[in-house]
Image: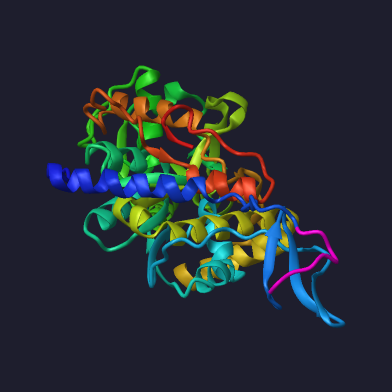
Amino acid sequence: MALRTSRPVRTALVAGLAAVAVVATAMMPATAVARAPKPGTACVKAGRTVVVAQLKYTCAKKGAKLVWGKGVKVAATLPKLATAPTLRLGFFANVTHAAALIAIQQGFFDKYLGADGTKVEYTVFNAGPSAIEAIKGGAIDASYIGPNPTISGFVSTDGELIRAVSGATSGGAQLVVKPSINSVADLKGKTLATPQLGNTQDVALRAWLKKNGYNVSLTGQGDVQVLPTDNAQTLALFQKGDIDGAWLPEPWASRLVIDAGAKVLLDEASLWPNGDFVTTNIVAETNYLAKYPGTVRSLIRANIAAIQWAKANSAAAKDAVQAQLLKWSGKKLSDAVINRAWDNLRLTWDPIATSLKTSANNAVKAGVLTNLGADGINGIYDLRLLNSVLKFSKLPTVSANKLGLE
């Protein structure tokens, strides 16, 4: 059931998000407007300091006089924002959520959120729709999640439930099938699995099948049967011959190929310009974002740190992911699987907003979303915290593609 809110609640929400705008604007390192004192000139109070253009001047006693010392460079800092005592964070035990897994394993969440005094509580999901329901039910505050559940959560609540605040992963999804299937024409009458009804790979498969002339129903009937199934069960069903293939995120696509003898019929990257499309982004519940922008900012900083570390330490990053997969799923991947999966994706804090509108249109074509409404997904992004952190870190900012704030 779609979540609706009353006009007073909606007004309060808008006011809260306006407050985020104020703090986001202030996130660049401060530059004092005071005039810099000249070193050696008289001052009136020992210990007084003035910071101008990131240079700190201190009034100190020199002989019998109080004079200003030379300017000492100080590190820029982000302004203090409201933080929460707890962040309840969702993610998947998938390689496409590697940034989250690495941030846990390498302590980046502890570093940035712990410094605020924020305790992080983790919840693992199999697919995005379950995470959206958890946000609706007040069970979590933010989540790593795919684009289509993000769209569904936004549209089904008139744009009031969540905002996408950062990217995490691009790529890492494939349609893998039995070796006897050689073309799209061979799929007639076959059964293909997806992680969950309405999740990102489920929508991608249904839209692609319809584009290729197949009748596909949400109830499973049609020219091709689409069977939403837990990823681990999909592997077992394929090994037993009960399904003919699956459209899956990594590492499950690689597991079916290497562990079960499947072959790739389609790499989803081939459907997108330059092979670049959002697979995982981070969403925050709007009231939480408005009330605790400092916590969301620290989440974003930890995500960026994890991605930067992974790019500089590829082998160690795969080991970190393996450690977390063992912790949350009880099993590591083989070296062959993790290496294949890793090569199929790209970690990035850019949400690749240009791909989201296409994903929304695909959801309508697939019948998962019946109507985007007059406003569509306008307003789904709030990238102000992300861009402020990127500017502070002297990194290029990212675009919301006119689908929200940046």
The residue that appears at 79% across and 68% down in the rendered structure is 42
Q: Is residue 399 visible?
A: yes
195 or 239, nearer to the observer: 195
User: Can you give x and y, in whole percent of width and height, for residue 186 in the image?
Assistant: 43, 25
Give the answer, above or below, for where 377 lies relative to 263. Answer: above
User: Can you give x and y, in whole percent of width and height, for residue 398 in the image?
Assistant: 57, 37
Query: In screen coordinates, is 227 left or right of 219?
Result: right
Query: In screen coordinates, is 57 left or right of 384?
Result: right
Q: Is residue 328 magenta?
A: no
The residue that appears at 49% across and 51% down in the rendered structure is 252
User: Can you give x and y, in whole percent of width and height, for residue 332 in the image?
Assistant: 56, 67
The residue that appears at 67% across and 58% down in the rendered structure is 76
201 or 74, nearer to the observer: 74
| Residue furthest out toward the left | 6
User: Can you give x and y, in whole percent of width and height, for residue 245 in the image?
Assistant: 43, 40
Q: Is residue 161 visible?
A: no
Q: Which residues are magenta?
A: 37-44
